[in-house]
Amino acid sequence: MSLNNDDIDRLVIGYREEFTPDVEQGLHRLRRSLREGGTVVRPIQSAPKSTSRRTFLGIAAAVALLVGCLSIFYFNQDNRTYLSNPDRAFAMFDLPDGSQLTLQQGATVSYDADTYNTATRDLTLAGQAYFEVQPDAARPFLVQHAAGVLRVTGTAFNLRTESDLLEVEVSEGAVILEQNGKRMQVAARECGLLAPGQPMVHKPAPNLNHHAWRTGELKFDHTPIDEVLSYFYDNWSIECTWAEGAACDYTVSGKYQSGDAGAVLSDIAKLGGATLTPMDDSGKRYTLSGPCTE
Amino acid sequence: MRSAPSTTDSELFSALRQGQSSALDALFRRHYVDLCRVALRLLNDEAAAEDVVQVVFTKLWTRRDTLPAHIPAVGPYLRRSVRNRSLNYLRDRSRLPLDDGELPDLPSDPSLQPGAALEAEELQRRLHQAIDRLPERCRLVFVMAKVEEMSHQEIAAGLNISVKTVENQMTRAYKFLRQWLAFILFLIVQNA
């Protein structure tokens, strides 16, 4: 006896129908989210089951969940709403206009709860975040910063800020950077930088390596080692210095996806014949040394 | 607005657009479980499935001013929203399957061996287990086509693959599922 495709089509009915979530509990959660201004705060999901696609963030999230001492903050002060991620690898939030953002550990976003999503969608960011902005040409989405303003009507991008730096890397659509009356468009797979008193910087970003803190993926194509190291700083605040100032000069090609940024860094060091040595237990500071070969 | 049984989804949707939160509650109660199942089929993660449906309903309320004035079929509209957001969820987390993956061997787990008799319901359960053993891309394509009734073009766009790849994965899924069930039935005959 055998079965044909029609039998399979008949038997497939009911697939995953056994899942019956609690409706009233779900409704209670929905109402709470709406009371909090439509901001849905969602805990990080654990890493995917497939071990072949583990990522930096998946492992970080799993470790964070094991530690069990986590919190993501949502609070109001002086009419401003603050979304903060003090200790998770990343945390996701929905804004009242439907835009979504993923905050890196240590990052905070704030907006005026009374005026957000009226004429504009103004907010500030300290740290690094990934935004998926809901299209709305009538209400521009603006990120205000000391170095300038980022303006967008609907797109996806990674944004990193320091006290005197705003750096955007766009994955979909385009954004506008404004500084002292000048405007510069940054399109998909491009990067833009603003710093006070400095000319605006515009460069290609074909591999979206500034998204690696979230995607876990780094791609290089004959990329100079100095630039490679800059991605480790920008994504994970990992600082590498060459011993006695003797820097090697080589390029890196390949795709890296791993649960251990330090291990990836060590592999990359070996490509140039260098040795990676931790300077302390923080996992954030390393020395590179050794003869340079490629 | 009270959601009497006679109140249609379209009437509730219209009331929701006018800002009646009770209409949102009623739509939520009617569709939450089914929508969570839709999301679960794509995400393979119950908590994530509920998250996605929560976001869909949150957006339904926060963006009620911009919702279409008339939606002929609210249920399919919500299902489509959940499917799209589920695929975005996978895409954003780099969890869309990038390769075809390996098909598993035929059942060797003793718990999967059939007994002397196999009711239709049990055969269905075994098929569902077999679907879960498909490589993830193959499983997604098959479930989107046969359970979610999406066209091959829609699946190709959603998973960022070609229609030809969708067709290949469907052929692969059917072949594996036929073999799997044939093996199960063979064991039944042997044990009878």
Image: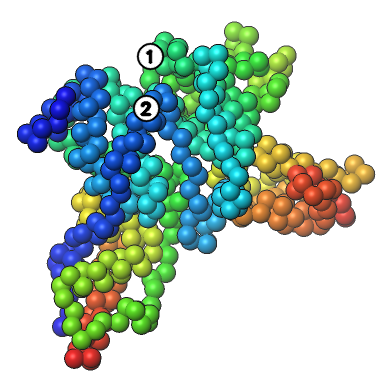
Please state if B168 lies on the left or on the right of A76 as rendered: left
Quarter of the image where one finds residue B21: top left
For mark 2, give the secondary structure: helix
Q: Is residue A207 visible?
A: no
Quadrant where the image shows the C terminus of chain A: bottom right
| Residue under the image location 93 percent in, 44 percent down | A244
- Which of the two marks, 1 or 2, is nearer to us in this view? 2
Per the image, the residue denoted by label 2 is A34
Please state if A261 lies on the left or on the right of B139 as rendered: right
Per the image, the residue denoted by label 1 is A138
Position of B192 relative to B160 (above/below): below
For mark 1, give the secondary structure: loop
Please state if B144 lies on the left or on the right of A140 as rendered: left
Precedes in sequence: disc 1 or disc 2: 2
Give the percent coordinates (x, y) of residue A145: 62, 17
- Judging from the image, the colouring scheme is rainbow
Instruction: Please tell me the numbered disc located at residue A10.
Output: none
